[in-house]
Image (cartoon, rainbow, N blue to C red):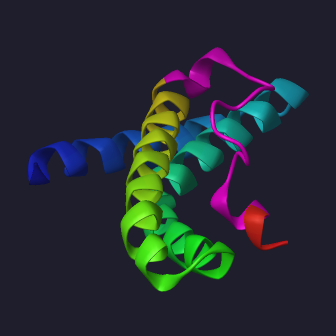
Amino acid sequence: MRKFLTVLLAIVLISAFTAAAFASERGTAVQEKLSRGAKNVALGWTEIPKNIVSTTKESNAVAGITVGTVKGVLQAFARTVSGLVDIVTFPIGRYDRPAVKPSMLQETAK
């Protein structure tokens, strides 16, 4: 697992420097896609506590702990997989419709 993460980090760093060489709009779109993917992979797990809190506010603590945890795990999995797909496919270019809404977790805080 450690070797996989090291290789993944190396690919992301090399890709980030390579993507910086693009000066066109496509280059910016590629960077945005890579950035979105890296953020979703790194922060996907935060869907779990976010859903526990939001479900608790909507109903009660028991539902928050049970239902919120299940919803959080499912959404965390979806966000992480979406991020991995973005990282793997970022050289292809822009994809205007991210698989997970909102496309980055920070957008829910606004």
Q: Position of residue 95 (x, y in %)?
A: 74, 23
Find the magenta span and give its range: 89-107
- Judged left or right of residue 98, residue 66 is left
What is the chief secondary structure element of the magenta stretch? loop
Q: Which residue sits at x=22%, y=51%?
A: 6
Q: Position of residue 17 (x, y in %)?
A: 56, 45
- Judged left or right of residue 12, residue 96 is right
Residue 90 magenta:
yes
Viewer-proximal residue, 29 or 10?
Answer: 29
Q: Position of residue 98 (x, y in %)?
A: 70, 32
Give above or below for 48 relative to 86.
below
- Judged left or right of residue 11, residue 101 is right
Residue 10 shows in this picture: yes
Give above or below for 34 relative to 66.
above
Q: Quadrant of residue 109?
A: bottom right
Looking at the rendered image, the quarter that the C terminus falls into is bottom right
Q: Position of residue 50 (x, y in %)?
A: 55, 72
Residue 42 shows in this picture: no
Q: Which residue sits at x=56%, y=56%?
A: 39
Find the residue positioned furthest to the top.
92
Viewer-proximal residue, 99 or 54?
Answer: 54
Give the number of marks. 0
Viewer-proximal residue, 57 or 51?
Answer: 57
Viewer-proximal residue, 60 or 105?
Answer: 60
Q: Which residue sits at x=71%, y=43%?
A: 101
Q: Which residue sits at x=31%, y=43%?
A: 8
Give above or below for 29 relative to 38.
above
Residue 79 magenta:
no
